[in-house]
Image: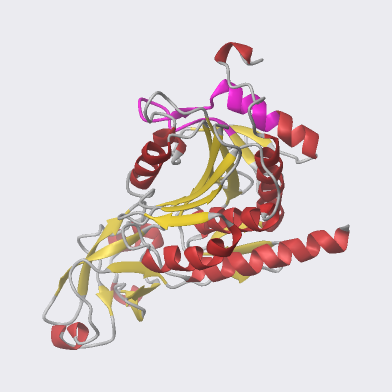
Amino acid sequence: MESSRSNEIATLKELLGELALIDGVAGHEHAVVARLNELLEPLVDEIEIDSYGNLFATRRGPENGPSLMISAHSDEIGAIVKSIEPSGMIRFERLGGLVETLTIGRHIKIRGQRGVVGVKAGHIQTPDERGRAPGFRELYIDMGFESAEEVRALGIRVGDAISYDEPMVELANPLRVAGKALDNRVGCAIVVELARRLQGVALDCTLHLVVTVQEEVGLRGAQMATHRLNPTAAIVVDTVPSGGTPDVDFYRDLSMRIGAGPVLPVSSGGGARGFLANPAMRDFLNNIAEAAGVAVQEAVFVGGNSDAAAVHLVRDGIPTGVVNIARRYSHSPVEMLDMRDALGAVDLLDAAARAFGPQTDLGFLSSRWG
């Protein structure tokens, strides 16, 4: 059994590394979606990509039966080219949650071409400059050239996407990995592995495995995809920041850890645009986890949202649950997660897809959380 789990982790890790390496900043997810289309097409009954890049991979169940959507977003945080100065330096703006302090002096890529985010030499920085992060208006990208003409000769234009150049690496603890875009390529890898497990398995529902776009800039693709499918219920797979480091208090800040199992958020976001776990889906996922022997963490996260915040509001309201993978150093080029959590999420979603059917009670008053 231990050898089998190790092999499963190795397979999932390899797939995650491949997907994380592909650049797919919000609005520019083409290469990621193309690869996922190749991976999923032989595993499902039908597959389609809409005009914005949302991917729908469907396993057909009994006619007139319920439908379950399991989704993950394909995009990563990044930036966009705003202008090219005569000197060849590139000015840019963020796409999604790019953070100034985590951007300075980093390797980046534009159209596959490497450059760096410039940083003033430490020898001549003033005390004030050393103690503050420059704003995006002050930052620039150096591709190694001396003129705008040389930069444009690479095909770089205003509106091109900029991504971190930070491939995923295995750490000293080989069960943990770090790199760019683990949010949410781990969700994409989980969806592919789930499709592999369920190939040839008879289900009591129609299963829609969906990869959405533009989550990092407002949960846009999820709204489009859910409106199109109008599923009976939905489960969103994403990542969530974790505690467990010296600068994040487990009890006051983030009460979830990497390596302790998938996270089932009770609440996220806060305010009018947040998400409160649907009571019936909360019951369903907790019961499935217990029956399948999957350790899970329930947690509250008010600092951000997932696609669930958009999914549950579509049409008449979609009963929605979330399966999160805890990660350290979120929205940085060195996001870290534990592969055991990712495999646990596959186990949980596998069991959920097999159990979901006409008998699944999604009634509000039936929940034990009332």
Residue ID at (67%, 61%) = 176
The part of the image, by quadrant, that contains residue 77 is bottom left
Is 282 included in the stretch rendered in magenta?
yes
Residue ID at (67%, 38%) = 352
Q: How is the image coloured?
A: secondary structure
- Find residue 366 and report its horizontal and vertical position in percent: 63, 13
- Find residue 134 and report its horizontal and vertical position in percent: 27, 59
Q: Looking at the image, can residue 38 be seen?
A: yes
- Find residue 246 and report its horizontal and vertical position in percent: 61, 48
Above or below residue 14? Residue 347 is above
Of residues 4 and 302, the one drawn nearer to the viewer in this rendering: 4
Indicate the quadrant containing the N terminus: top left, top right, bottom left or bottom right: bottom right
In the image as oriented, which residue stretches furthest toward the right? 1
Residue ID at (21%, 66%) = 159
In the image as oriented, which residue stretches furthest toward the front? 63
Residue ID at (37%, 65%) = 30
- 78 vs 139, left or right, is right
The part of the image, by quadrant, that contains residue 206 is top right
Q: Which residues are magenta?
A: 265-286
Is 69 included in the stretch rendered in magenta?
no
Q: Looking at the image, can residue 253 be seen?
A: no
- 119 vs 184, left or right, is left
- Find residue 232 and report its horizontal and vertical position in percent: 51, 30
- 90 vs 30, left or right, is left
Above or below residue 85? Residue 308 is above
Of residues 8 and 83, the one drawn nearer to the viewer in this rendering: 8
Of residues 185 and 101, the one drawn nearer to the viewer in this rendering: 185
Indicate the quadrant containing the C terminus: top left, top right, bottom left or bottom right: top right
Above or below residue 172? Residue 93 is above
- 2 vs 79, left or right, is right
